[in-house]
């Protein structure tokens, strides 16, 4: 009798942990951070920024949430090209990274770029960050590619995870349009939604 109870308990634990594992999604990424810094170039000349680039949604290369730890004063180091302001973010959670060969994200815990000028962000702000790749290296177009979060469980995180888990299918976050509109990204979501819905009608 005792052995039977023991076996049932073991099976229950196994079933529970298996169930938990099966619920993990693409955006649930376990990272063992290294105390290194990822420096990402600013593609200041791109006309768009944010998570919904291009006519049908360009692939995101790195998406993470984190905390701003340091902001330097703006300067004219970039000459007449753009106003440069370097900022540092401690990465808290990574939701996606794309294989870029030698330039693939390699578990760095800190992020730095000089795209922070005009973003109205402060030290200790929680942010959601979207990077792309340009010439086989990570890049960030600034602007709406760094969004201030209200909390660590902000609905933006839930929405972007749904988008990533569905292989960037915008129809999966269609109901979140008002949420993204608050950040000036409603029309960008509409554009890629139109593309996805048009493609499904053609099939």
Image: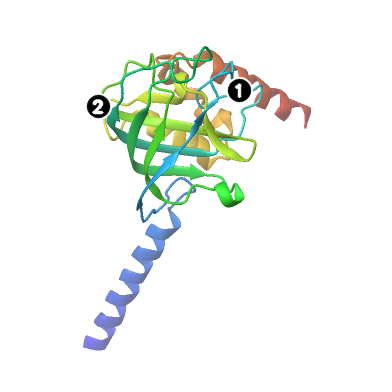
Residue 43 spot, x, y in % from top left? 55, 25
Q: Which residue is label 2 attached to?
A: 123
Q: Residues within 10 Å of mark 2 (few under 14, many from 20)?
A: few
The secondary element bearing badge 1 is classed as helix
Q: Which residue is label 1 attached to?
A: 193
Residue 4 spot, x, y in % from top left? 28, 84
Q: Identify which residue is drawn at 30% across, 76% down.
A: 10
Task: Pick whichever of labels 2 and 1 is earlier in the sequence.
Answer: 2
Q: Identify which residue is drawn at 45% across, 58% down.
A: 22
**Residue at the right extreme of this rendering:** 202
Q: Tell me: 60 left or right of 86.
A: right
Query: How many angstroms separate mark 2 from mark 1 (CA)?
Result: 35 Å
Q: Nearer the viewer, residue 142 or 178?
A: 142
Q: Residues within 10 Å of mark 1 (few under 14, many from 20)?
A: many
Q: Tell me: 11 left or right of 187.
A: left
Query: Is residue 106 shown above or below 72?
Result: below
Residue 154 spot, x, y in % from top left? 32, 30
Choose mark 2 or mark 1, whichever is in front.
Answer: 2
Q: Nearer the viewer, residue 155 or 6?
A: 155
């Amino acid at each position: 009798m005792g052995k039977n109870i023991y076996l049932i308990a073991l099976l229950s634990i196994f079933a529970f942990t298996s169930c938990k594992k099966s619920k993990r999604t693409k955006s649930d990424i376990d990272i063992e951070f290294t105390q290194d810094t990822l420096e990402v170039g600013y593609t200041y000349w791109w006309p768009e920024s944010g998570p919904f680039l291009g006519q049908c949604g360009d692939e995101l290369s790195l998406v993470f949430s984190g905390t701003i730890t340091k902001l330097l004063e703006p300067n004219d180091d970039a000459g007449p090209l753009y106003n440069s302001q370097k900022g540092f973010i401690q990465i808290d959670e990574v939701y996606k990274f794309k294989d870029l060969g030698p330039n693939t994200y390699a578990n760095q815990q800190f992020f730095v770029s000089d795209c922070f000028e005009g973003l109205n962000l402060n030290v200790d702000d929680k942010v959601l960050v979207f990077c792309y790749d340009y010439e086989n290296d990570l890049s960030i177009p600034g602007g709406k590619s760094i969004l201030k979060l209200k909390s660590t469980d902000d609905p933006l995180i839930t929405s972007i995870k749904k988008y990533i888990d569905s292989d960037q299918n915008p129809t999966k976050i269609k109901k979140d349009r008002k949420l993204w509109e608050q950040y000036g990204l409603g029309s960008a979501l509409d554009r890629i939604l139109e593309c996805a819905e048009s493609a499904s009608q053609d099939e």
